[in-house]
Image (cartoon, helix red, strand yellow):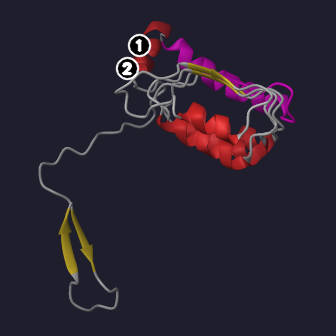
Amino acid sequence: MLGDEALRLICGMLPPDGAKSGLRELTLSANPSITTKGWARLAIAVAHSSQLRVLNLDYNPLGDQIAGMLAVAVASSRTLEVLDLEGTGLTNQSAQVFLDVVENYPTCLRVLVLAENAINPELQQQISDLLSEGEEDDDKESEARCSAGIPTREKTTWVPHSNSHPQRVLLTSGLGESLLAETEM
């Protein structure tokens, strides 16, 4: 029977920088008192957590809006491997968003539980198949990559910008007038 204040404290145990250890597994089953604001705070913390591997949110009244936030967190997370959303009031809309995530973005996610939701079984199977593809590559290599913060099933490559020159931001009025400011970052 946790609420937003308890969730705020829990989010403090999901450090973003890896400088201190944080939770690796979090179970928040059946907490109907948590509001959309509380779930949004959790989604942000999960997106930036450097440690979290397993997140169980089963039997919470999340719905599609909160599931969308969690999908963004999954896409951003470099460590989350298991997400349990059983009996959380999701529909095909949420499942389509998760399908897009696992189909088009590199992620460490290996298990997504969507049972007891109003989701088409074929859609659930598509997601499961895509997640299984990531595991088939080589479980040990995949696990090592996620432990190192490197997503699996890479379809795109992200190369950090390592230019020694400072970036410049040019601010103009947009009316063709003279340059108003140049700032080095």
Where are the magenta residues, as a range? 111-137
Residue 53 located within the stretch drawn in magenta: no
Residue 136 position in % (x across, y down): 55, 12
**Residue at the spot of label 1:** 144
Residues packed near mark 1 inside 10 Å, few (<14), some (14 to 19) or many (20 plus): some
Residue drawn 37% across and 36% down?
Answer: 157
The residue tagged with tag 2: helix, strand or loop? loop
Q: Amino acid at mark 2?
A: Ala
Task: Say if 80 sits above or below 168 in the image.
Answer: above
Vertical relation: 169 (above or below) 164: below
> Dots 2 and 1: beta carbons under 8 Å?
yes
Q: Quadrant of residue 180?
A: bottom left
Specify whether 3 is left or right of 45.
right
Q: CA distance from mark 2 to mark 1?
A: 6 Å
Q: Which residue is mark 2?
A: 148
Quadrant of the snapshot with the N terminus: top right
Residue 35, horizontal then vertical, whole percent: 74, 46
Q: Amino acid at mark 1?
A: Ala
Asked if residue 18 is positioned above or below residue 94 in the image, the reply reads above
